[in-house]
Every structure is written in structure tokens, then in C-alpha cells.
Amino acid sequence: MDNLARDQRVTVWHFSIYVSLFNKWAVNDFPDSFPISRSEIMARTHIGSIVTYHKCIRQLRDYGYIIYRPSYNPFNGSWVTLLVY
């Protein structure tokens, strides 16, 4: 989290999503990858815009903080791997 906090590209929205992902990772006993639901993460982070959510997820991936494997099926969650250094 220190790297994230020092990264000038990261906004409060990125940080909020990452903390929510980190919490979900910890609650699930730190698996290599875990499923996420867009609606669940948006509710936890108080992000009201789907566009903002997807932009921040994409940027967290591009910045090297997560590996994101989207699911285009509404019944299957997308999968995330946190890249913790």
C-alpha cells in the first residue's frame, strides 16, 4: 500500500478500489486469484459510475498493481490477482 500511496498517478478512487480488493483478498485467506463482482466493489467504494470503476480497474492493471481477468458473463465474476511486492 505504501507504493500505491506514493504513486502520483493514483487517485482516491484507485486507492479505494485497491483497499476493497485487498480486504476481499484477506477475507478469503490470501488466494492467488479471487472472483470479484463489479456491483459489490462499487458499493463498497461508493463509486457511482461504471465508467469510473472500469477506468480505475484498467489503470490499476496498467500501473502493475493487479492482474484483472474480466468475465463478460453476468453470472460469473471477474477474477483479480493482487501484485504485492
Image: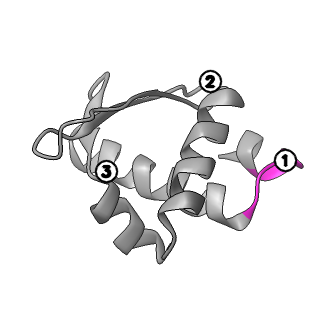
SS at circle 1: loop
Q: Nearer the viewer, residue 77 or 14?
A: 77
Residue at x-position 26% and y-position 52%: 37
Q: Is residue 78 left or right of residue 49?
A: left
Residue at x-position 54% and y-position 25%: 83
Mark 3 and mark 1 residues within 8 Å of each other at the beta carbon? no
* Colour pattern of the rendering: one colour
Q: Position of residue 26 (x, y in %)?
A: 32, 45
Between tags 3 and 1, which lies in front? 1
* Mark nearer the N terminus (3 vs 2): 3
Q: Is residue 15 left or right of residue 20?
A: right
Residue that numbered label 2 is attached to: 85
In the image, which disc is placed on residue 20? none
How crowded pointer 3 is (Cα within 10 Å; few <14, some 14-19, many 20+) is rated as some
What segment is highlighted magenta in the picture?
5-11
As displayed, is residue 40 above or below residue 73? below
Residue at x-position 65% and y-position 46%: 1
